[in-house]
Image: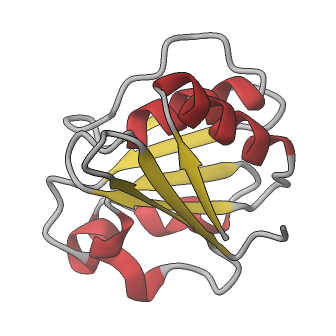
């Protein structure tokens, strides 16, 4: 399924809506180029889980944990070299936990993602709209 958003608010709202359907153990793969809106989506997603604290991209910390309706493990793997490094930091345990794991730059560990992963890819259009492709989610 592909969705077109025309503003940050619409991208945030899509994240919010998807979070409403999440259950414990959900993994969200969030991909797209720098500045495509991954963190904007993540902010809406966190709000949809009832998280009120500010959401920032955990580029330097790699993993941020937030408490809401379900725990949210927000990862940014931009600085990781790949699966080996992900395993060394204990990241794999978050893929099978009782919270929701949202992973920016998840393509770096693609082979480790569970079969049930929901894939969200954000593409910037020439007019700055966002084309958001969703896989693994029921329409």
Q: Look at 84% across and 30% down and name the residue there.
A: 69
Q: Foreground: 93 or 26?
A: 26
Is residue 66 visible to the viewer in this orientation of the structure? no
Quadrant of res 90: bottom left
Q: Quadrant of residue 52?
A: top right
The residue lying at 45 percent from left, 83 percent from top is 112
* Horizontal side, residue 120 vs residue 117: left or right: left
Tell me if residue 95 can be seen: yes
Residue in the image at 68% along x and 50% along y: 100
> Looking at the image, which residue sits at the far top?
53
Decide: is 124 above or below 136: above
Residues 8 and 116: in front is 8
**Quadrant (top left/top right/bottom left/bottom right) for the N terminus:** bottom right
The image quadrant that residue 72 belongs to is top right
Residue 113 lies, in percent from the top left, at 51, 79
Q: Residue at x 61, y 81 (%)?
A: 114
Q: Where residue 5 sits: x, y (%)?
A: 54, 41
In screen coordinates, is 125 left or right of 97? left
């Amino acid at each position: 399924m592909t969705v077109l958003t025309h503003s940050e608010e619409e991208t945030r709202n899509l994240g919010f809506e998807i979070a409403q359907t999440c259950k414990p153990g959900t993994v969200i793969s969030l991909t797209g180029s720098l500045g495509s809106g991954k963190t904007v989506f993540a902010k809406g997603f966190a709000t949809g889980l009832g998280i009120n604290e500010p959401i920032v991209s955990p580029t330097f910390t790699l993993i941020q944990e937030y408490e809401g309706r379900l725990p949210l493990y927000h990862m940014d793997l931009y600085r990781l070299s790949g699966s080996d490094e992900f395993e060394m930091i204990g990241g794999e345990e978050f893929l099978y936990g009782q919270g929701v794991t949202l992973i920016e730059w998840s393509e770096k560990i693609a082979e480790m993602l569970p079969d049930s992963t929901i894939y969200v890819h954000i593409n910037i259009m020439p007019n700055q709209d966002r084309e958001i492709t969703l896989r693994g989610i029921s329409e």
